[in-house]
Amino acid sequence: MNGLISLGGTLAILLVLGVVVGCTDRQRFSLRWLLIAALLVAVNDGLLTRAYGSLPDLIGGEWNWQGKLLALCATLAIAASPAFSFRRVGLTIAQELGSLKAALPVALLYCAFFAVIAVAFPGGRSSGEEIAFQLTMPGLEEEPFYRGILLFALDQAFTRRKRFLGVDWGWGAVLSCFLFGMAHAFSFSHGSFSFDPITMALTAIPSFIAVWMRLRTGSLLLPILLHNFGNSFPLLA
């Protein structure tokens, strides 16, 4: 029940923010696509939690392999649909011509950010399963969702763009990063909502770097690789 209430709070915030932003530029706002984005968040959350614990864990282990794999399969199925398509959501290894020259320095900045985090917040001893999970599942599941199909849906909901740092930004980029941060920092338990601003900053800020790389290169390849580096580096350092 706590998970459902937390999801409800997140969706309420998304829809209120989305409608407020949309009302400032109605000609470039699609309520239908905002509702699709909200539905995507709900489906992703339901699968990650194995329908909030109602589905048996057939894989086992200490980490959420089954939830991540279920969510990834749903993301890939949605990305394959005509309304989305792999190419439009960035599920391609092809990079925009000349983009790697610009993206590599930013990728180094991303790595440096997580190196600093690893030094500032050293972790304890890690199991082999934890290392294997962090080397694979976070980037493989979260990037195609947040920087892939969710970003695409939100970009269809808010079509106004502003050129900055070589890419065209929209409210979709901002809201997808906001939702990524909320997934880690916002929750409901013991009868009340809680919000951790430090966790929000540590997740939402690198999200903007990942979005920039996704928009600049046209591909999720670098965001996936760097996401897994960011998650696993503190365990290996």
Image (cartoon, rainbow, N blue to C red):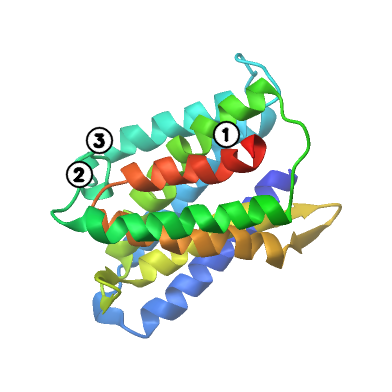
Q: Residue furthest bottom?
A: 24
Disc 1 to disc 3: CB gap under 8 Å? no
**Crowding near pointer 3: few (<14 within 10 Å), some, many (20+)?**
some
**Quadrant (top left/top right/bottom left/bottom right) for the N terminus:** top right
| Residue at 64%, 18% in the rendered image | 57
Give above or below for 98 relative to 149: below
Q: Which residue is mark 1?
A: 134
At numbered mark 3, what does the secondary structure look like: helix, strand or loop?
loop
| Amino acid carrying mark 3 in the image | Ala
Q: Quadrant of residue 233?
A: top right
| Residue at 43%, 51% in the rendered image | 146
Give above or below for 85 relative to 184: above
Q: Nearer the viewer, mark 1 or mark 3?
A: 1
Whether residue 111 sits left or right of residue 199 in the image: it is: left
Residue 88: x and y, percent?
21, 49
Give above or below for 17 relative to 107: below
Is residue 176 in view?
no
| Residue at 57%, 34% in the rendered image | 134
145 or 236: nearer the eye? Answer: 236
130 or 51: nearer the eye? Answer: 130
Q: Which mark is residue 87?
A: 2
In 3D space, how far apart are the residues under numbered discs 2 and 1 (Cα atoms)? 26 Å
Q: Which residue is mark 3?
A: 80
202 or 147: nearer the eye? Answer: 202
Residue 84: x and y, percent?
24, 46
**Crowding near pointer 1: few (<14 within 10 Å), some, many (20+)?**
many
| Amino acid carrying mark 1 in the image | Gln
| Amino acid carrying mark 2 in the image | Arg
Q: Name the N-terminal-most of marks 2 and 1.
A: 2
Q: Name the N-terminal-most of marks 1 and 3.
A: 3
Whether residue 151 sits left or right of residue 64 in the image: it is: left
